[in-house]
Image (tube, rainbow, N blue to C red):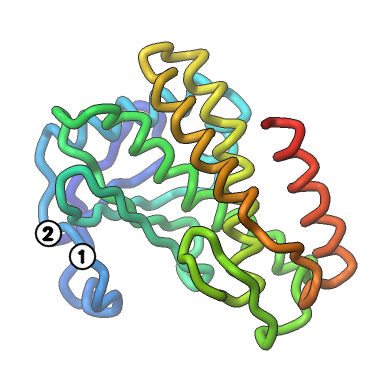
Amino acid sequence: MGLARIVSEHGDIAVEVLPDRVAAEFDGLPLASTMDDDSIKLLQAAFELLRSVESLGETVFTLVKNLHVLESDKGMDVSFSSPGVPFTIFVSVPHPDERYAVIRLVEGIVHEAMHLQLSLIENGCALVTGSEHSAYSPWKQRDRPVQGVLHGIYVFAVILQALDELADRAPEFRAYSTKRRSEILDELGDMDPLEDGLTSNGVAFHRHLMSAVAGDA
């Protein structure tokens, strides 16, 4: 399908529909084959809200250069990124008439951008000792590799802070922010200690994250 549209207000993120031959490399991902004007408008609104939180917007727009849209059922948000595809995220776009559509989309974008950021950090600073260690993931509700669990803690620690700042800029999202923050804090509170399988830098990073989360509760 080629390039579908570039959201040009900020000149930073290309919103694309992947060509068929490239899309085939992501078999299993529910890639959208088209995008309508409503989806583009919602993306523009999400980008604008991100820009309103200067530090957050600057980080996201530095990390994300390409965005590909995923199909999802109404009321469901899905997203994906991979260290092997830098500066690229995949997110579903809620229907515009869904409740809290804009901030839900923002959360998905921030979520995947933070995965990209931590992957870049890991390129220069090892946080885990290997892939043989696992830990309980409250998001998957089963044991997962320690690296993935640490990524989850980092992503949600950032989202926890971002939700408050976003709601300050857009008070109509305060109820969503309050509910999601409570959910995230409950999930992080269900975690077992996470030190096995971490390097000394990983241990220090994990402790810093959990301290920040405790101070944000």
Q: Is residue 181 left or right of residue 195?
A: left
Going by the picture, which residue comes out furthest to the bottom? 132
Residue depth check, mark 2 versus mark 1: number of the one nearer the observer: 1
Residue 33 numbered tag = 2
Would you identify the image quadrant in which residue 12 lies?
top left
Answer above or below: position of 205 versus 53: below
Residue lying at 19% horizontally and 67% vertically, measured from the top left: 19
Residues at marks 2 and 1 touching, judged by CB atoms closer than 8 Å: no
Residue lying at 23% horizontally and 72% vertically, measured from the top left: 23
Residue lying at 69% horizontally and 82% vertically, measured from the top left: 133
Location of mark 1 (residue) = 30
Residue 138: give x, y in percent of width and height: 53, 60
Helix, strand or loop at label 2? It is loop
Q: CA distance from mark 2 to mark 1?
A: 9 Å
Helix, strand or loop at label 1? It is loop
Q: Residues within 10 Å of mark 2 (few under 14, many from 20)?
A: some
Residue 121: give x, y in percent of width and height: 71, 60
Given residues 130 and 177, the one toward you in this image is 177
Residue lying at 65% horizontally and 58% vertically, measured from the top left: 191
The amino acid type, in three-letter code, at marker 1 is Pro
Q: Is residue 68 left or right of residue 34?
A: right
Residue 184: give x, y in percent of width and height: 54, 43
Q: Is residue 69 left or right of residue 194?
A: left
Given residues 22 and 203, the one toward you in this image is 203
